[in-house]
């Protein structure tokens, strides 16, 4: 879901390697949870096809969350540079 979001917003091209994308994604989501822009309701393990899981946790691949309007400004502040 996050990779599709990055492609839709044209940020994916600046995050060329898997490591840089994962680091950017983890930092963005971490900041969003901390600020309350995203609220996690539930998480389950899912299957291998569901990706690496939230923050790389294989037991949290299927997530149920709410995303609030504050996420917009936070997302715009996360420039995809220096994530190698």
Image (tube, rainbow, N blue to C red):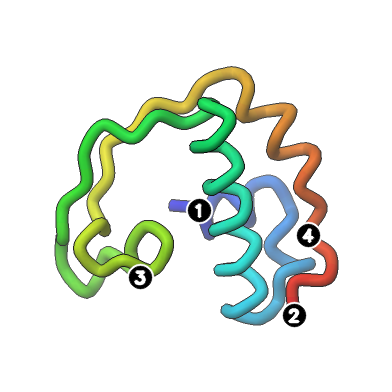
Task: Name the residue: 78% across, 37% down.
Answer: 76
Report which residue position mark 3 lands on.
52
Quarter of the image with the C terminus in it: bottom right
Marks 2 and 1 in Cβ contact (< 8 Å): no
Report whether 57 appears left or right of 81.
left
Neighbor class of circle 3 (other Cα within 10 Å; few <14, some 14-19, many 20+) is some
N-terminal of the two: label 2 or label 1?
1
Q: Give residue 30's position: percent from left, percent from top.
A: 54, 48
Report whether 61 appears left or right of 10.
left
Residue 14 vs 36, above or below: the answer is below
N-terminal of the two: label 3 or label 4?
3
Q: Secondary structure at mark 1?
A: helix
N-terminal of the two: label 4 or label 1?
1
Q: CA distance from mark 4 to mark 2?
A: 10 Å
Q: CA distance from mark 1 to mark 3?
A: 11 Å
Residue 72 vs 19, above or below: the answer is above
Q: CA distance from mark 3 to mark 4?
A: 20 Å
Q: CA distance from mark 2 to mark 1?
A: 18 Å
Report which residue position mark 1 lands on.
2
Q: CA distance from mark 4 to mark 1?
A: 14 Å
Q: Secondary structure at mark 3?
A: loop
Report whether 80 appears left or right of 2.
right
What is the residue that sits farthest to the top in this orientation? 69
Q: How many numbered marks have been drawn onto this rendered protein structure?
A: 4
Report which residue position mark 4 lands on.
80
Q: Give residue 61's position: percent from left, percent from top.
A: 26, 58
Report which residue position mark 2 lands on.
84
Q: Secondary structure at mark 2?
A: loop
Give residue 7's quadrant in the image. Answer: bottom right
Foreground residue among 61 and 27: 27
Neighbor class of circle 2 (other Cα within 10 Å; few <14, some 14-19, many 20+) is few
**Looking at the rendered structure, which numbered label has been put on residue 22?**
none
């Amino acid at each position: 879901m996050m990779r599709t979001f990055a492609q839709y917003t044209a940020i994916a091209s600046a995050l060329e390697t898997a490591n840089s994308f994962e680091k950017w994604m983890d930092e963005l989501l971490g900041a969003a949870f901390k600020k309350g822009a995203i609220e996690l309701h539930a998480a389950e393990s899912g299957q291998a096809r569901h990706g690496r899981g939230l923050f790389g946790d294989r037991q949290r691949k299927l997530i149920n969350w709410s995303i609030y309007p504050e996420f917009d400004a936070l997302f715009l502040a996360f420039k995809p540079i220096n994530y190698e």
